[in-house]
Amino acid sequence: MPTSYDAIILGAGAAGLMCAARAGQRGKRVLVLERAEKPGKKILISGGGRCNFTNIGAGPTNYLSANPHFAKSALARYTARDFLDLVESYGIAWHEKTLGQLFCDSSAKQIVEMLLEECAKGDVTVRCSEEVTSVAHGDGFAVTTQTGTYTAPALVIATGGPSIPKMGATGFAYDLARQFGLKVVEPRPALVPLTLGGEEVLFRDISGVSAPVVATANKTGFAEAALFTHRGLSGPAILQASSYWRPGEPLFVDFIPERTAEWLMDAKRGNPRSGVRTQLREALPARLADILADKLGLDGDLGNLPDKALRSAGERLKRWTFHPNGTEGFAKAEVTVGGISTAELSSKTMQAKRFPGLYAIGEAVDVTGWLGGYNFQWAWASGVAAGDAL
């Protein structure tokens, strides 16, 4: 096989394969090097094996970054509809779940097969089980693996972030970026369960209980389900909020999003002989209701409790304060917040401003989407941006 190419892409994940297909179909000679034994491993496990491949409402406001404007260009030029058109052109059946999330009807394998077919159309070479031992830059880039040294004038970093290390994820992208003098925004786990300690440990006793809530961190709230676990808090609402939460900060949970803070006062007028615990059990799962009732410490009939106490209880239920003592870390994080600084990259091409020929795309970059297909859409859009520029 040849050792010289127009572009070498490190990583055969969503962003890397998309970039390779795009560049290959433009006539570029492209080599993709993947450390794992097969391409698209994270794609295959996503969405419970059905791949939440995009979100029909994806836009710049659904992403976290030190520069919230950076993602606008790529997302505008390659939209969720564009990717859906590609999916449909392959006859892949799909369905929409809640909040614009699009999934394969059958299997995530179809998305990987589609991307590999797109690569084949561009005569892209994809090599798996390739461990990169060094990357040098002289007259172009030289990438050495256990099988040899490959050269190209362009190198694309598409190796993702350190989330889900059991899938082989590492911080290699950041090491490489630093090697070439690019700044890295400190990575931290995102879309990750939060852990509870201290007096809040008792909530672990209701592991497996879930309820619809609004979870808020740093003034950003998400209305979805929360799930209590044997270590703390999880579920979509918590995972979403975790991306905005920082250690030492509180997390606020509205346990009664469909009701007002005056709800118990209204109940008192309608049924004064009912108790707080009874009302909570009507609104929430019984085991959760009992813990909250114990914490509120209001016993007896509603009719015997002052309005002030009932309003205070209602306000507390609308903004229950948790103090997580940490997260479950990169091992349980779906993605990474932080990464290669967007200040180093062109938002149009993903090329490093101070290092021509070097590109970074996908999760390796400091752009992190919400839960629900947004991170895949960033992979497709950033991959296309770089693939069109190579």
Image (cartoon, helix red, strand yellow):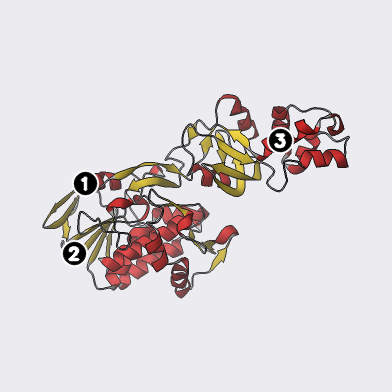
Look at the image and tell me in which quarter the C terminus lies.
bottom left
Look at the image and tell me in which quarter the N terminus lies.
bottom left
Give the foreground label among 1 and 3.
1
**Image location (x, y in percent) of residue 211:** 66, 44
Q: Residue furthest left?
A: 139
Q: Amino acid at mark 1?
A: Gly
Q: In which quadrant of the rendered view does residue 33 lie? A: bottom left
Q: Nearer the viewer, residue 220 or 194?
A: 220
Q: Amino acid at mark 2?
A: Tyr
Q: Which mark is residue 181?
A: 1
Left or right relative to 282: residue 8 = left
Q: Which mark is residue 5?
A: 2
Residue 78 visible here: no
Left or right relative to 21: residue 87 = right
Q: Nearer the viewer, residue 37 or 265?
A: 265
Cα distance between the residues tagged 1 and 3:
53 Å
**Image location (x, y in percent) of residue 218:** 51, 41
Q: Amino acid at mark 3?
A: Arg
> Badge 3 is on which residue?
287
